[in-house]
Image (spheres, grey):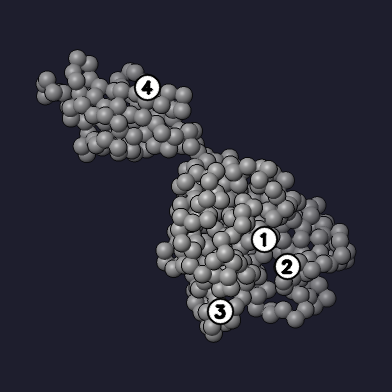
Amino acid sequence: MSEYRYEPLSEISNFGGMGEVAFSKDLHLDRKVAIKFLQAGVEERRFLDEQLALMQLRSKHVVQLYDVINIQGREGLVLEFIEGKDLSELDYDELGSDVLIHHLWQIACGLVDIHNHGIIHRDLKPNNVRMNEDGVIKIFDFGLSRSQSNAATKGVVGTFVFMAPELWGAGSSNFSKAVDVYAFAITALVLANKELPQELCELPPLEYIRGGKIRESLSGVDSKVVDIIEQCLSYDPAMRPSMKNVEICLRRYLLKGRHTGLFIIGDEQKYVDSSKRSTKIGLQNDPTSISIEYDGYDFKITHISGCVRVNNQIATVGRALPESSVLTFESSKSQSRAFVTFDISNPEVVV
């Protein structure tokens, strides 16, 4: 390959079930790349599916396709070189549950981007996810991917255990983005170094009864996260959440305790956050008031005296304040009103 733009840095080696990879140097841009060639005897359509999928995708959490080349009659995909480890090589017992959830959130972000482009990965597993030197998680190997408009298969294709029940049908079977949601949940359990319930190890997998072994084995993980992982394992694909809802749940957990609520009362400002979790706001010389408490996720109303409205709706105990709100206090002693604005900061998960 030295006569071309790409200079080999290693011999061509097998990579997964259908590809051969040569790690090379891009002489024009002075960077490492991975060039993936179709393995002999493998269906050419799968190689084309991967090429088409990666040409559409631009995501921080998906390996990038740089170029398509032909060397001595062999087509190759020039891919982003990811210096790092597959997630199957990491020990999450040692790294801890917060790191696990952070990595799962990044996988979820990647799958959201993939699904938003109308693509189904169909082979998500720890060996197809890698963390680069900057801690960014990247999903790769799109050899089994399909567009949502062409989501049908003949026979059993995929990696056992990670395959959703609907992929095991005899003859031709249709599938949806939900197969990636199922594989995500199995990936989460495998990364947690937890033994899978026996019913999920059967080929094909049997229906998992929620509240069983997974909840016990993930006892150190936030209950809301466990809930959504169990939902992802639903036997009926229609009952699985979207990856966007999974991403929102994981992000919500990662941002726990990091919000700041700001009340502006005339010239006065009041802050509520993890260091000062509650406050009471009301009218001077009037019993009309409202009490707010921050539980790490939401700013919830805990007590109301008199008539208080939130964005023109009667305030109720237990309700979480919207991100931007106007609180209206109606005096019990006169016809006057007072207005208080409320805003929540927008913290982001740092990768």
Mark 3–mark 2 Cα distance, whole angstroms, equals: 20 Å
Marks 4 and 1 close (CB-CB < 8 Å): no
- Disc 1 residue type? Asn
Q: Tag 2 or tag 1, which sits nearer the N-term?
A: 2
Q: Nearer the viewer, residue 334 or 306?
A: 306
- Disc 3 residue type? Thr
Mark 4–mark 3 Cα distance, whole angstroms, equals: 58 Å
Mark 2–mark 4 Cα distance, whole angstroms, equals: 57 Å
The residue that mark 3 highlights is 153
Marks 3 and 2 close (CB-CB < 8 Å): no
Residue 223's spot in the image, x, y percent? Answer: 47, 46
Mark 4–mark 1 Cα distance, whole angstroms, equals: 48 Å
Q: Tag 1 or tag 3, which sits nearer the N-term?
A: 1
Q: Quadrant of the C terminus?
A: top right
Mark 3–mark 1 Cα distance, whole angstroms, equals: 21 Å
The residue that mark 1 highlights is 128
Q: Residue at x 50, y 73 (%)?
A: 166
Which of labels 4 and 1 is toward the front? Answer: 1
Which of labels 2 and 4 is toward the front? Answer: 2
Mark 1, secondary structure of its residue: helix
The residue that mark 2 highlights is 16
Q: Tag 2 or tag 3, which sits nearer the N-term?
A: 2
Q: Residue at x 56, y 61 (%)?
A: 197
Mark 2, secondary structure of its residue: loop
Residue 126's spot in the image, x, y percent? Answer: 66, 58
